[in-house]
Image: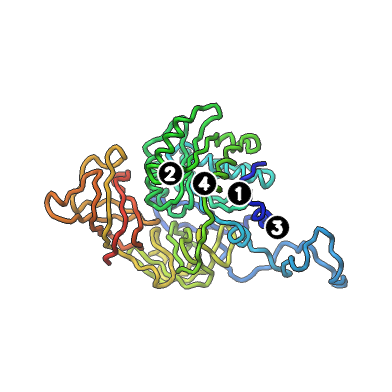
Amino acid sequence: MFLFGSRKKKKQQVEQAEPVRRTEEEPIAEADPVPDDDLDFDLDLDLDLDLDLESEPDDEPDDEQKPDDEPDDEQKPDNEPDDDEEQDDGEELDESLVLGHIMPHYVLGLIGQSQQGKTTLAAAILQVMAYRKGPHGSTSRYDLDSLPEERERGVTIAGNIAEAVCDWRHYVLLDCPGDPFYVKNAIAMMPMMDVAVLVVSAREGIMEHTREHVLLARQMGVPYVVGFLNASPDADTEKLKGDVARLLEKNGYADMPIVVGDCRRAAEDPNECGGPIAELMAAIQEYLPDYDRPGDQPFLMGVHQVFAREDVTVVTGCVEQGALRPGSSVELTGLGSTQACTVQDIQIFHKSTDIANVADVIGVALQCPEPGLVQRGQVLADPGSAACCQTFRAQVRLLRAEDGGRRGGVKSGYRPMFYFRTAAVDGQLILDGDGADAYLMPGDQCKLTVKLAKPVYLEKEQTFPIRDGGRTVGFGQVLELLD
């Protein structure tokens, strides 16, 4: 058995409050998603929203049902809880209370170059976690890659989402695509992360898109990045560990732990080969602090995916601030559209919940007057709390060619793509000055004006990447909102 922490008190609290096991509800028939030919929008959360909000009878019988003629004051066996610890008849312990309130809740992402072991590492983490809780199943990379194109090509396209419980922490696991054609899906998932694991194959080493993913993680606000070298036990990885440490330090992730292990062997035999996974999760537990997530702020969530389900619209995303309850009035805004909506249901991993808190990855069933206008990149917020902006002042830096950027400079009027939360929108760089002054060379940075094609929700000091031609060419920071 692998231990991931020494906080026994929290662990005992969770074990005492764990009579409810996560079980899948019977799936309902899925309606076709909103038409879109781009696979980038097809991240499968395996939503199973039951929109009948009336309470249903519990199919499971109570653990102990007394006959009517049996006295209530009958003495209980020693292994039964006391009366003050029992729940009321007919009540079931809310699973979100166990996993989201008692246990600290975090979002863990896996980033890095394609074909270096991210999905296999995700499978290994799930296998080791399952082994610790009992007989493990058959989780594999093909259980995670759900799209037919992903299984056929052996690459992650849309990304995968799973959950894992590690002693006294509950994790939502995000497996990001590493293929350069689908990097915008990885960018959309990065704002959700509390911590990311940079996966590097010892055989391939640091590749071009390994560097790009670390840069994108910094610009999208991922606070911590740890390293995992996917290598066989007899491989010499000391030089590569030094290279990965320098790459992380260059992007603002100094003194982060780097773990070496064979994730494929760990996934196949979590008992004998799961030690490196245990070490990885212990390192994350040590370096990731216990966040104080205030819930008194206005609700805000970036829309990651959109699905059409019968007479409702389902949006998915990660709660950024505040809290959300069924029946709440909310506002969908951004990308040129604003409409008032009503929350009909909220689900977290197949389970309806009466509240969604910060860092919860959720699916929300909305009653919208114009469902055709709902799209990825908008934000779901309390009414009137998220004003969008189309023009702003920013500090922008272009990357040099050796860092993956452009070889030549750009003039005023240059139109790349900008990424804010889950939104990808084209815009225009308007440089100050005329003639030779209105020219920005690779490696230079300056203050300028950005005019977007569509308004999005922005905040001061928010950082963002700039991409053009399938590569990251620069990054910037919002200084002032102009409209």
Q: Distance between the Cα atoms at labels 3 and 2?
A: 38 Å
Tell me which amino acid carries mark 3. Gln
Q: Residues within 10 Å of mark 3 (few under 14, many from 20)?
A: few
Q: Distance between the Cα atoms at labels 1 and 3?
A: 16 Å
Residue at point 87%, 70% (across, down): 70
Which residue corresponds to mark 4?
A: 146
Which residue corresponds to mark 2?
A: 254
Residue 196, compared with residue 204, is above or below; it is below
Find the residue positioned furthest to the left.
Answer: 435
Tell me which amino acid carries mark 1. Cys
Q: Distance between the Cα atoms at labels 2 and 1?
A: 25 Å
Disc 4 element: loop
Q: Nearer the viewer, mark 2 or mark 4?
A: 2
Which residue corresponds to mark 3?
A: 16
Q: Nearer the viewer, mark 1 or mark 4?
A: 1
Q: Distance between the Cα atoms at labels 2 and 4?
A: 35 Å
- Of the numbered discs 2 and 1, the one sitting upstream in the chain is 1
Which residue corresponds to mark 1?
A: 166
Q: Nearer the viewer, mark 3 or mark 4?
A: 3
**Whether label 3 touches label 2, CB < 8 Å:** no
**Whether label 1 touches label 3, CB < 8 Å:** no
- Of the numbered discs 3 and 2, the one sitting upstream in the chain is 3
